[in-house]
Image: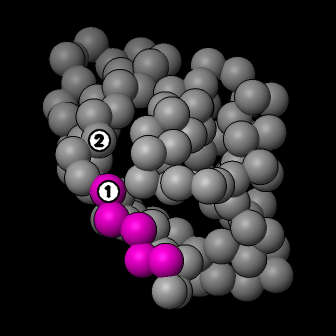
Amino acid sequence: MENPQQQIRDVLRLIVSSPSADDQEAAVKKYFMHNAGFDHPLFHIEPGPSSRSTILGVYQWLLTVASRVDVEIRSIVYERRNHVLIVESVLGVHFKLWPFQPVPCQ
């Protein structure tokens, strides 16, 4: 990425909201390093040799259980020195077979 703070919005929407598992996989492979780490309130993936495939598994699980995911990105911080990207976002997950309205989670 040339400018992560500007480009990450489109990348996250592609990964989180993609209706296609193939498009999602292509985006994760393109934008995540093979040894990327991932911190989320529900998941923590340590950086390691095959951590990108574990990250892909998290996103593809979300694609399996949700009919739609809306993402609102609130803030982005890129720490160039350590190659760390911090994104504050709110997801609206529309679970399949769930009769209730989604509750946004941060």
Instruction: Identify residue for label 2.
Output: 73
Q: Quadrant of residue 79?
A: bottom left
- On the image, the x and y values in percent for residue 76 come to 32, 56
Residue 87 placement: quadrant = bottom left
Mark 2 and mark 1 in contact? Answer it, CB < 8 Å: yes
Would you say 24 lies left or right of 73 here?
Answer: right
**Residue at 21% from the left image edge and 45% from the top image edge:** 74
Residue at 65%, 41% (x, y): give it. 60
**Residue 7, image x and y in percent?**
51, 43
Span highlighted in magenta in the image: 76-80
Up-down relation of residue 19 to residue 10 (above or below): above
Find out whether residue 58 is within the magenta segment: no
Give the crowd class for mark 1: few <14, some 14-19, many >=20 residues within 10 Å.
Answer: some
Residue 9 visible in the shown view = yes
Closest to the observer: 14 or 83?
83
The residue tagged 1 is: 76
Q: Looking at the picture, which amino acid does disc 1 mark?
A: Ile
Residue visible at 62% across and 19% down in the picture: 19
